[in-house]
Each structure stands twice: as C-alpha cells, then as structure tokens.
Image (cartoon, rainbow, N blue to C red):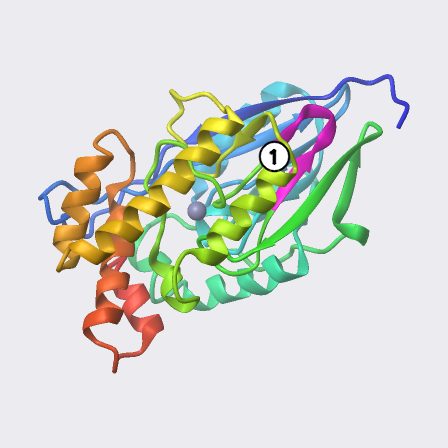
Amino acid sequence: MSTTVTIAYDVFVNDPPPQDNGLLPNAEPKSGSPVASTLIYGDEDAVLTDPAFTTGQAHALGDWVAEKGRNLTDIFVTHGHGDHWFAAGLLAERFGARVVATAGSIAQMDVSIGLRPFLWDKVYPGIPPAPVTAVTVPGNRLTLDGHELVMVEVGHSDTDDTSVLHVPDLELVVAGDVIYNGAHLYLGESVLVDGFQPWRDAIDKVEALEPHHIVCGHQNRQLDDDATRTIAETRHYLDDADELLQTEATAVDFFNAMVDRYPDHLARTVLWAGASALYGVREHPEQDVSEILVAGWL
Ligand SMILES: [Zn+2]
C-alpha cells in the first residue's frame, strides 16, 4: 500500500472507578482494574479503542482525546465486557464518531447490558445509559489515512467472542483482554469453556500477527508495551493458575498463592472474582454457573 501519511498511537490509562462493596480476603478494599484506551491517529483523523465505562472515565478520556486535535471517526470495542465500552456512547456523541466491533462482540455487548442490574450497577456507580450502538464494518477492516486497521477475531479469552485490532504498519496489536500487562487476569469465564486452552489459542493468534507492540486492555501504566514480554507473561500467568488450581484447596488459598506469585500485579479484585468462580463451580456443581460468576464480583 502506498501512502505518505504516517500514523502513530498513544495510550490513555483510566484509573478504576471507586467502589464500595466490601473487602478482599486479605482485608484490603475492593478495586477494579485500570482500563487502557488507544488512540491511533494520522494528520487529521483518529480511531479510539475500548473507551472504558463510567461517566467520569469518559470525561477524562474525552479531554485527552480532544487535546490530540484529531477528527475521531471510529471507536472500536474489542469485546463485550462492559468495562471496555459502557462509555462508548458518551464519547461517540462528544466527537461525532461511530462505534464499531465484530458481530460476535456486539452480541456479547447485549449480554453485558442484560447483566447490568445484577452486576455492573451493583458494583460501580456512575455508568451512563449505554444502548448497544456498535455496528460491523465490511471485512472487519477500517482504514486510517490509507493504513489498514484489522479487527481479528480470536475466540474465547477472558470471555467469549473476543477480538483484537491489528495495525500492521505500526506493528501494533490492541489486544483487549487477550493479553494483560501487570494486572491480574479475569479467570472466571474459563468455567464456561473447560479451562484455559481457548485463551492459550487466542494468545497464539495474537503472536501469529508478529506484533512488536501490544496495548493490553488492562495494564499498569508504568510498564512498556513490549509484545514478547506481555505475551510470555500472560501465558505464564495461565500456567501458574493451572498449577495452583491443582494444589490449592479453596478460593482463598488460591487467591493468596497468586498474590504471593504476583505481588505487584494490580486489580486483586479481578483475581478474587475469578477465584470465587473457579472454586464456586468446583464446590457447587449443582448451582447455576452464571449466578456463581456474578456472585464473584459482588
Ligand atoms: Zn476487561
């Protein structure tokens, strides 16, 4: 592809919103994960990814986007989890942008809407009205000043029907929740797919894109975006989880053992939600799995 306009990207990491729903097993207050949004921009236009979920986050992110002085054409959402997109409508309205996603992710966005009263609104105040306005685009491709941005479907990672945005000319993958960077992985939904193999397959698909940079949906803003490191660390985390699921008798034991191995990782609340689900399903096979998953967050 011949093009003269150079594109670039920048990342804004929103702090998790305040929450007030009890303590973790180690008695620290619950707190969610930071959410990273990526702005890919040329001389005039820009595309934003995963615009977080509360009104406060939308304001902070929107002010950052406005400072870049570009025309925001599209907001891409990697997957259906509400923390990555409930604020998309506010940003779309502010900048006159379109919200885009794969068909699979759009279906999962509807699932998150269904869960709002039982999960999201119970834990996090300040989520705006969030109708699903996302649309698909032909071939799951966008162009930005002549450069291709490709939505790549990778299947189940920390939820069903996840996708990543591949920007070949930047050797960049915006990985959503397929790859994590310095924050605890959400392991809960592995109970729906019998373990971590689908997630490992999704990681392989990201690696096959040969990125040099990976922006993770949840990351410690102190860390770099090195693709090799973040891929290796995400794989290693899943291996550790598999090992400790064999050796640890209870959710609390698992939580404590993972915190011992990852003392600097952010978002222990996400670790606890996953541990509660994994051990909840193990200990109560007769119970409804979606109720167990939701209960882990409350
Ligand atoms: Zn997420």
Can you see residue 242? Answer: yes
Q: Please name whichever residue, 56 or 78, is drawn nearer the observer in this view of the structure.
A: 78
Q: Given the current orientation, which residue lies at the most extreme bottom position?
A: 286
| Residue carrying label 1 | 173
Q: Position of residue 12 (x, y in %)?
A: 50, 27
- Dividing the picture into quarters, in which one does residue 286 lie? bottom left
Q: Is residue 186 above or below residue 213?
A: below
Q: Position of residue 167 (x, y in %)?
A: 69, 32
**Residue at the image point whose x is 54% and y is 65% from the top:** 110
Q: Secondary structure at mark 1?
A: strand
Q: Position of residue 105 (x, y in %)?
A: 59, 57
**Residue at the image point whose x is 77% and y is 18% from the top:** 43
Q: Is residue 40 above or below residue 289?
A: above
Based on the picture, tell me whether residue 268 belongs to the magenta stretch. no
Q: Is residue 278 above or below residue 52?
A: below
Q: Position of residue 269 (x, y in %)?
A: 25, 46
Based on the picture, tell me whether residue 166 belongs to the magenta stretch. yes
